[in-house]
Image (tube, rainbow, N blue to C red):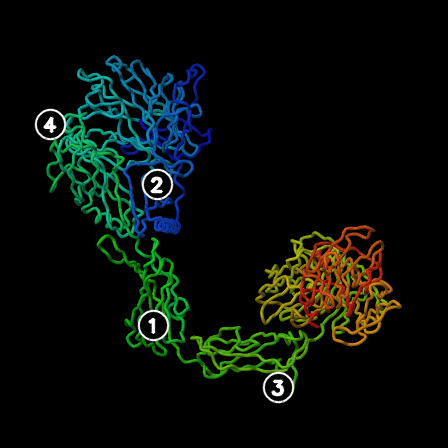
Amino acid sequence: MKYVPVAFRRVNPALTRPLRRIATGSTVLVTLAAALAGPSAAHAEPPAATATAAVPATAAVPDPRPLSAAQLAAADARAVTKARAEGRAVEVAERATETQTWLARPDGSMHFEESAVPTRVRRGDGTWGTPDPALRMADGRLRPVLSAADVAFSTGGSGPFATMLVGGQRLALTWPTVLRAPTISGDAATYAEALPGVDLVVRATEDGFSHVLVVKNRAAAQLSELQTIRLGLAGTDLTAGVSADGELRFTSRSGAVAASGSRALMWDAGAGATAKAPGDLTRKSVAASTLDGGALVLRPDLSLLGAADTQYPVYIDPSYSKGEKRWAYSNSKNENNDNEVRVGKSPSSGATYRAYFTFDVSGLAKKRIFAAQFHSTIVHSWSCANTPFSLYQVASAGSGKITWDGPDLGAKMGEYSGHAHKPSSTSSSGGCSDDPQPDKPFEIGGSMTSAVNTAAGNSASEVAFTLTAFSGATAGESIGERWKKFKLADTKITVDYNSPPATPTSASTDGRGCTTGAARPVLSTATPTLRAVVSDPDPETDLQAVFEWQQYNSGTGTWTALGSGQMNSLAKGGTGSVQIKSELVQGGIYQWRAKTVDPWTYGSTSGTDSSGPTGWCEFTVDLIGPALAPGVSSPVYGSDLNQVYGAVGRTAPFTFTASGVADVTAYRYGWADPPTTQVSVAAGASATLAVTPPPAPADPTSGGLSRLYVVSLDAAGHISPVTEYAFNLGSATAANGYWKLDDAAFADSAGSAPAAVPAGGPATGVAGRFQPGPGKAAPATVTFDGTDDTATVNAPVVDTSTSFTVSVWARSDGDTADYRSVVSAPATHSSSFLLGRASTNKWRFAMPQTDTVAPTHVNTFSTSAIQAGAWTNLTAVYDAGARMVYLYVNGVLEGSTAQPAAIAATRLQLAGDFWNDSPTFENKWKGGLADLRLWNRVLSPGEVAPLAADLVGRWTLDGDGADSTPWQRTATPTATAFYVEDRDSSAFSALQGDGATVAATTAGPALRSDQSYTVAAWVRLDSTTTYEEVLGQGGTARGAIFLRYDYVTKKWQFFVPTVDVGTPSYYSARSTADAAVGVWTHLVGVYDAAAGNFKIYVNGSLNGSIAGRMWASSGVFDIGRQRFGTGDFFTGAIDDVRVYQGAMPAAQVAALYAS
């Protein structure tokens, strides 16, 4: 009996129970859900079987997960590409199965084969191999070398003699008594004397296993144990059913047939019989198969076992196959068959046989079938000469043994005559002169192509055929000379086919998409271009895109064909296009569609296959644009050029009108001609928009004459004449509110807003980020504790429902709370904006779109992380005209987000925010704040950048060391100092260093070096023989800041010790090119405490950078020397030295160089 893989589901051992019989109609069902017990202690395993030395045994792996249609099409394309490159047919590996082969040919056509039975096995590595059932010892069990099933046989004992594993599940058969160790011969394990005089032969097959009882003599045939043979049967989640005629089916929970087989066949040792199959003249019968509890019960035909003329041994073989058989047989005497295909009148029993085959053609659905053939091989014939047989189509074939009276024969496919006599069987003449005759392969074409083409056209999943001994018009089936046998493994169909093309995609009308009705596009051309992308399941390079178009007749309400066109020689995925050259009229309504056409040639025939058409695509033609320019007005920005209006960055409403043109559907506007920003309107309607005037390109704070350009458009895209709306724009205005936070008053130094009212006791007068100077004290700051400290400005200050800018200096004291707000603007239920810390330790600017409880925020985040202790400038801008939010960190844009709407604030909140009608402020800030400013306008990048770095010292060195800033940090020159021409050739305007004594020094430090700072100078290097110090600030044991020439590397160098000790290591950022001698050069060194890096710029361009952190120094500031060692006095000229508290952005550095 053969058993094969099934799809089991693992069962909890606690739920296992005895086999349960279920009667359903004429079929008995048994659910296998019990596990077999191992050998009992009283029956120890016998010595191991003698077998060939252990070698790897391989079971088949399941086919890969089914691929999508798109994935299969891509696999086909790859195979065709390879076939063309190599000039040979290439298998589509992704489609391969045990029975199916798909080939791509160099000409692009495809070939399909399906065998009636599996002919190959997929190995574990994905390659295919020929089944090899020879047994080998592996893991203590007997296993086939390569099989479609993971089967193993016992080495003897009382356990299961055969097991099969599928997906971790187990199916097992057990002999009722202890078995001896088997002897091995090829694919068979023989367990001698399983019963007295009876051997059990278990054989590995290509797709499972079988077992045969060999009754060796008449005495054995009389054993009572042979009257009813009970085999233990166990499995998991498998239902076994026995039909009324003895057919057995094993089905999984999904209902799929996992294994099937016919009734057990019996035969004696008559002429031609073997342990595998009976001969033609062998006595045959059947053994009934039933299910009883946990057993498979066989009841042999006792009349055959004990008949006087029975020749021993007698074989009892229930035969099964993997899955459901794809072939079947019938005969006029209801005999059982083996795995041989038989046709005609049997010479032993006189029964007339037919063979039926079912082939899966689901993969050929809607394909064009060029040719189809049925193939097999004659392996035996009764006659020595050719005799005919025929192939017919049938509606369905079933599997195993089917009744003689069905199914009805359908259309005849074809007829063939052949012979292949073998001397192992007698013939009518007693033998053939050329015995043994070779096997005879054959093929039948005939009507096969038509039959398979019809099935493909109907998307049928299967086609079925029957071989008969008929010839002509169903004659001669019972003529004995026509008896034949065929090789099942050679039985297959082959099909050459072409896939019909796919309906085009991506249809577009002159680039405007494909729509109908009111949404149809209006075109401004009478010769539009129609486009569509062609495709085909097969790789193609000769596809055609065929278009047709029609015109709508409004009088009759009908469409009239107007024209057609096509583009040829398109590759799969190519875009086909045609331009309509026929005259299209103003206001006309048209529609078009496209299809893909695939020309083909097969042998001497040719033709085309067409896809279905796309849907209709409509369009209207409008050849006349708006004749009048649009009207433009604004209640804020008037057109009187004798007046100045508004201010740079202040958003205001502008209204555009259609000037009476009824078909205007959009406006475009912008500050350059042609304008590019577009807004759509209903036909003929006006539009009122928030628009933000930009600053003059040369100066971010300057206004002057501004021009807004506006055009109108109709639905076809025609553009009207342009309106140039000119007005005088006011210069940038100062902040509407400015809280320096440098004292306990919390006053607004801008003078227009109330002072902030502190709560909880924030600490005031805290040292900030500046060093004091002779002319100006260092501004103090305020520190909030993150618990109950806040401050409130009880006025909105600016209207946050339109454009505004907020800027503040903030210092985090290492807080790790999820959210902290530096500043916010409460509205009715929540805050209109929140600027502060996000849970990711990034800066966050958030704005809701509605003033409700728990609103959804639009968040804008920084890219840089927050550095504890580092003063950081934060600037957030809301541009209502552009509907965008911008977040700057230390003058650099780090985030931008679309903001569709905004809400108005009622007040301003420091160090916290208002959320969900809460009576107290939440998310309180822990750290320092300074210099909070708000503007009722948009600050451009050019205005934001200077906020990041405050000028705290400037020495023009025009004959002295005066500091031109309010800090008044005079740099006293040495007695030997003298002055020369600067880079502009102004006399006595640059300090000339002599490399020995000339320098200038302040009375104290100019920079707080543990916070961000920037140093800059113009220099002319006159010597390269030693270190040349341009400027620096001293520490206690070492210099703290060095901007110098490094004679070792010949580079400019921004040089900082890691610690204030005598011999530290250094952070060093150098120029990329060697320092130029005798040439005026602009040098800038930037320390960014928030980012933790040092940068050097040369002539406005970043040259080098290095990560590191600075420490606080208290030494004096030197120009032309450094404070320790030899002094490294500069040799050359130094001019316009500037120092800033803050990290100057790159754009500002470039602007400083350009100034």
User: In the rendered image, which residue does mark 3 sit on?
Assistant: 640
Tag 3, which secondary structure? loop
Amino acid tagged 2? Thr
Binning the other alpha carbons within 10 Å of mark 1 as few (below 14), some (14 to 19) or many (20 upward) gives some
Amino acid tagged 1? Ile
Q: Nearer the viewer, residue 173 or 296?
A: 173
Using the numbered discs, state the Cα–Cα distance from disc 1 to disc 2 in whole angstroms.
49 Å
Percent x, y of residue 460: 27, 48
- Do the residues under discs 1 and 3 have CB atoms within 8 angstroms? no
Using the numbered discs, state the Cα–Cα distance from disc 4 to disc 1 in whole angstroms.
79 Å
Q: Nearer the viewer, mark 3 or mark 2?
A: 2
Mark 3 or mark 2: whose residue is earlier in sequence: 2
Quadrant where the image shows the C terminus: bottom right
User: In the rendered image, which residue does mark 4 sit on?
Assistant: 428
Using the numbered discs, state the Cα–Cα distance from disc 4 to disc 2 in whole angstroms.
43 Å
**Residue at the image position 34 percent from the left and 70 percent from the top:** 591
Amino acid tagged 3? Asp
Amino acid tagged 4? Ser
User: In the rendered image, which residue does mark 2 sit on?
Assistant: 97
On screen, residue 707 above or below 572: below
Q: Quadrant of residue 777?
A: bottom right
Q: Nearer the viewer, mark 4 or mark 2?
A: 4
Quadrant where the image shows the N terminus: top left
Q: Quadrant of residue 198?
A: top left
User: In the rendered image, which residue does mark 1 sit on?
Assistant: 580
Mark 3 or mark 4: whose residue is earlier in sequence: 4
Mark 4 or mark 2: whose residue is earlier in sequence: 2
Using the numbered discs, state the Cα–Cα distance from disc 1 to disc 3 in whole angstroms.
50 Å
Binning the other alpha carbons within 10 Å of mark 3 as few (below 14), some (14 to 19) or many (20 upward) gives few
